[in-house]
Amino acid sequence: MPTYDYQCQTCKKDFTALHKISEAAPPCPDCGGEAKKKLSAPAVHGGGQKAAPPPSGGCGMGGCGHRH
């Protein structure tokens, strides 16, 4: 389930909520006021590190450091 960042329109406090995308915004946990979803960057998962490209010259010219 995704997490969403909200700001209460009454007390202006920020909070995070975990719920389904189809569910409505929850009320503020502090005052019960109406909350508005804040714009936030998406999470990026997995993938690991990518290999660095070989130095200029490529593998066929010995530029990769390997002995051919």
Image: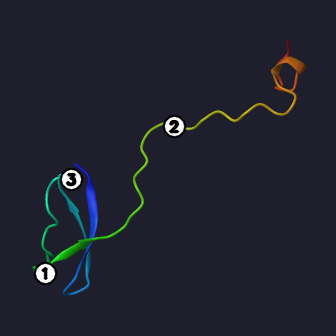
Q: For this view, does 50 lie left or right of residue 38?
A: right
Q: Which mark is residue 17?
A: none
Residue that mark 3 sits on: 21
Instruction: Residue at 85% x, 16% y: name it.
Output: 67
Q: What is the secondary structure assignment of the residue under circle 1?
A: loop
User: What is the basis of the colouring in this image?
Assistant: rainbow
- Residue 29 lies, in percent from the top left, at 14, 75
Q: Is residue 3 above or below residue 11?
A: above
Residue that mark 1 sits on: 33
Q: Is residue 45 above or below residue 30?
A: above
- Residue 8 lies, in percent from the top left, at 22, 79
- Residue 64 lies, in percent from the top left, at 82, 26
Q: Are marks 1 and 2 in contact (CB under 8 Å)?
A: no
Residue that mark 2 sits on: 48
User: Residue 31, located in which quarter of the rendered image?
Assistant: bottom left
Q: Is residue 38 above or below residue 46?
A: below
The numbered mark, 1 or 2, whose residue comes first in the sequence reads: 1
| Residue at the left extreme, as displayed | 32
User: Residue 68, located in which quarter of the rendered image?
Assistant: top right
Say which amino acid is labelled 1. Answer: Gly
- Measured in 3D between alpha carbons, the distance from the residue under mark 1 to the one under mark 3, in whole angstroms, is 20 Å
Say which amino acid is labelled 3. Answer: Ile
Mark 1 or mark 2, which is nearer to you? 1
Instruction: Residue at 21% x, 87% y: name it.
Output: 11
**Disc 2 crowd, CA 10 A, few/some/many (<14, 14-19, 20+):** few
Instruction: Residue at 16% x, 53% y: name it.
Output: 22
- Measured in 3D between alpha carbons, the distance from the residue under mark 1 to the one under mark 2, in whole angstroms, is 41 Å
Q: Are marks 2 and 3 in contact (CB under 8 Å)?
A: no
- Measured in 3D between alpha carbons, the distance from the residue under mark 2 to the one under mark 3, in whole angstroms, is 27 Å
Q: What is the secondary structure assignment of the residue under circle 2?
A: loop
Say which amino acid is labelled 2. Answer: Gly
**Disc 3 crowd, CA 10 A, few/some/many (<14, 14-19, 20+):** few
